[in-house]
Image (cartoon, coloured by chain):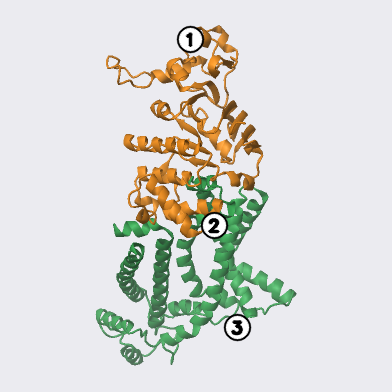
Amino acid sequence: MSLLEVKGLNVGFDTPEGEVHAVNNLNFSLNAGDALAIVGESGSGKTQTVMAIMGLLAENGHVNGQAMFKGKDLLQMSTSELNKHRGSEIAMIFQDPMTSLNPYLSIEKQMIEVVIHHQGLNKAEARAHAVEMLRAVRIPDPERSIRQYPHEFSGGMRQRVIVAMGLLCEPDLLIADEPTTALDVTVQTHISHLMSALRQNSNAAIILITHDLGVVAGLCDRVLVMYAGEAVECGTVEQIYYDPKHPYTQGLLNSVPRLDRPEDTELHAIPGNPPNLLSLPEGCKFRDRCPKAYAACTETPPMQIDEGQHAHCCFRGASE
Amino acid sequence: MMQDTGMARHTLRRFLGLIPTLLMLITVAFFLMRVAPGGPFDSEMVLPPEIEANLNAKYHLDEPLLRQYFRYLGQVAVLDFGPSIQYKDWTVNELIAQGLPVSMRVGLTAIVVAFVLGTLLGITAALKQNTGMDYSLMGAAMLGMSIPNFVIAPVLILLLAVYAGWLPAGGWDSGIASMVLPVITLSLPVTAYVARLTRGSMIEVLHSNFIRTARAKGLPEMVVITRHALRPALLPVISFMGPATAGMISGSVVIERIFSIPGLGSYFVQGALNRDYTLVMGVVIFYGVLIILLNFMVDLIYAWLDPKIRYDENH
């Protein structure tokens, strides 16, 4: 049984202009110890996918489909039922370290409440555990730092605190939403090391949302490429990096600056913008920006699964 | 503890800052009162010049203004507001000491009611945002804010005192029964305002990222609200409570008149109308000190609630 199996996930938002289709018919699954990267441009539905799984959608959002976690559907759970899993078995690391910590509470209060609530530790045990975790993420002088407030920390330190907070209960599934985007490169490396260590030590599964394809290669073994709320390609890191089938994936990879090709001085970009999620076009959603589009692309291309579980949805995919 | 010294320093700094404010208040009030036309002995009946001169001499009103000012400062420094000019045989200190306890009892009760009830209603409305509950609460709050107290008071008297006969229509015997109607009248608009203020800030806080983090931790919604959301949501309410409290415990003329309560409020108006210089100065300074002290308390509560304020002050 997979740890997490997402089937036919749809996420929409009611807005005054109409319904925004943020995620459409998304399927993926994850076993214990897997590390899956979800990549794609801003607005491709990566974040809303995991928000829906965590039950954290905005009030105007609605979701249908299935998200089976250890055999139980997270999407059907009441909030109190969901709360037994959130924070303990599933932890989430958010995108913006500057605003994700409560500015009115000390780091200590924010960290110990997780373990006190889920593991029933007393205050002193919880505190000792939290200090250890801060030490593990290399916060200097953790006994003193834990008494401080978020505004006394830099962005990188706050993100490390958030990572430490996520790891406190040794989750089976860690969802990290662009955990390193706001950080400088050395801290980025450190944070990805922390996540790989969690994976190795406790066989946790990781979902990493990012648009940094470099981080993906270091940490993950599978990649799900999303475009306009849909999965366009999914495969192992090797398959995606060395044999991308979908023109969108190829465009994404092409837009990564390559230090190993000094003669290539141009910064490549995919022309155009993602489609309006209020009124998605029929057929392939990428067709208007696709250099390889042809007549058949006005029909919706089916998901094709090649050997080695490499899936993609492009009529041209097989022929390239 | 680092935090404690930060708090102590913050307190001391704020406290020292109060002295110039107070001095400025006294100065402006003193000279403004003298600039206003008329004097304490002007009335329908014109006094013979000799008598007026004698009276002026008695109250030192014949001295140069600056000398009067410094004489007054000296008095205030030892907390002596002098004799009332209008109410013969009474000192201003006595008048305040007589009216204040009554005004304070009514005012403090009303402010506590307004704070507790207002925040509870506001939080309820915020949690039920855009439901029938929210709309009816906020509609009622709007009504409570817009009906003036001189309309509410007679209606309450009519319903609860005259028709139902449950409560006295007015008068003051220091009992609970005689307090109920004045307290309701006084607290109603403040409750309504606090409820609206709380609702607004609570809704804003509930949309912030750190609340999302708290929810992602799997904490029960009750804990998310009380531990994570309440503190920031109450900050705007706290800063409103300072001046509101000062206003309420120093007495309301309208309410004291309608319910015949011997409070402090009527001295404000009487003193000003009669050009009772010492009485006006006394109540103005008293009221000013009250506002300054309550704002000072608000500052302290703010610093206690918001660690960032302690931090910014000391770095």
Q: Identify the residue position indicated by label 1 in the image.
A: A292
Q: Would residue A104 be visible to someone looking at this image?
A: no
Determine whether the residue tagged by mark 1 lies in a helix, strand or loop.
loop
Image x and y of residue A308, in percent: 53, 17
Residue at 39% across / 45% down in the picture? A136
* Residue at which label 3 appears: B172
Q: Nearer the viewer, mark 1 or mark 3?
A: 1
The numbered dot on residue B226 is: 2
Q: Are marks 1 and 3 on the same chain?
A: no
Viewer-nearest of labels 2 and 3?
2
In the rendered image, residue A162, in percent from the top left (x then y), is placed at 43, 45
Q: Amino acid at mark 1?
A: Lys
User: How crowded is the residue under tag 3: few (<14 C-alpha within 10 Å), some, or many (20+)?
Assistant: some
A159 w.r.t. B239: above or below: above
Q: State the orange chain.
A: A
- Nearest the eye: B201 or B54: B201
Q: Residues within 10 Å of mark 2 (few under 14, many from 20)?
A: few
Which of B45/A306 is in front?
A: A306
The answer to whether tags 2 and 3 share a subunit is yes
